[in-house]
């Protein structure tokens, strides 16, 4: 004797719960929780391999202006488009996440030279600066990026995040649409 029961709805619900737990519902990018897990793993990998990893903290310049003038729907479209551009610019093994509002983080693993990070940061800025058109309106946006590296700057997740955030604010103060590496000065 046997009993057969269809559990496809249960499995679909489990997949949906996992998606909600680890991914941003608007952009489909990794959320803060998954970002933190991957950051810890990336730092450990950098220490083990003797290579570096970089944490980029990216904040949209003038995002509030777009939201206020064109509406929240336009802001959502902008966030989705920027998310796609970020994901399509970095390597497949890197992690792009939206950690809130118009703030994104990017984890670059297995970095051999700072020049690699500079090249990626310049590509990201260039991609984001491409105009976005929706509903007949054009939005010109830019982003400021702060970069901290492990293990040279720090190895603790919260410290790395704080350092990348500080570098990002320095980039904003320096004229926006730029990037800064963290340094003690």
Image: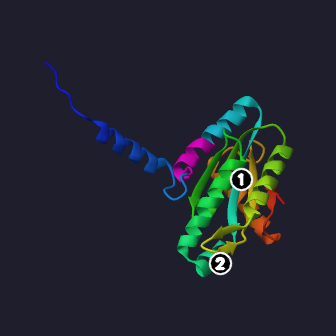
Q: Main secondary structure of the magenta part?
A: helix
Question: Which sits in the foreground, 157 or 5?
Answer: 5
Residue 183 lies within the magenta run: no
From the image, tell me which residue sits under label 2: 65
In the image, residue 137 lies at what x, y percent? 65, 75
Find the residue positioned furthest to the left: 1
Quarter placement of the C terminus: bottom right
In the image, residue 19 lies at what x, y percent? 45, 47
Q: Real-space Cα distance between discs 1 and 2?
A: 23 Å
In the image, residue 158 lies at what x, y percent? 62, 52
Residue 62 visible (yes or no): no
Q: Residues within 10 Å of mark 2 (few under 14, many from 20)?
A: few
Find the residue positioned furthest to the front: 136
From the image, tell me which residue sits under label 1: 56
Residues in magenta?
29-39
Q: Nearer the viewer, mark 1 or mark 2?
A: 2
Find the residue positioned furthest to the right: 115
Question: Which sits in the foreground, 84 or 181?
Answer: 84
Residue drawn at x 67%, y 34% as measured from the top left = 45
* 12 displayed left or right of 25: left
Q: How is the image coloured?
A: rainbow
């Amino acid at each position: 004797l046997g009993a057969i029961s269809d559990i496809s709805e249960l499995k679909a619900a489990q997949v949906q719960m996992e998606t909600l737990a680890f991914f941003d519902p608007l952009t489909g990018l990794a959320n803060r929780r998954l970002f933190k897990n991957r950051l810890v793993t990336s730092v450990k990998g950098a220490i083990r391999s003797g290579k570096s990893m970089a944490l980029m903290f990216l904040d949209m310049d003038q995002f509030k202006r777009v939201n206020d003038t064109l509406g929240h729907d336009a802001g959502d479209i902008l966030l989705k488009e920027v998310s796609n551009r970020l994901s399509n610019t970095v390597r497949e093994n890197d992690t792009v996440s939206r950690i809130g509002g118009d703030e994104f983080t990017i984890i670059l693993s297995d970095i051999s030279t700072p020049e690699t990070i500079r090249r990626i940061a310049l590509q990201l800025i260039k991609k984001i600066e491409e105009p976005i058109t929706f509903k007949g309106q054009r939005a010109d946006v830019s982003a400021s990026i702060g970069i901290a590296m492990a293990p040279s700057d720090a190895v603790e997740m919260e410290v790395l995040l704080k350092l990348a955030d500080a570098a990002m604010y320095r980039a904003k103060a320096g004229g926006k649409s730029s990037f800064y590496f963290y340094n003690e000065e």
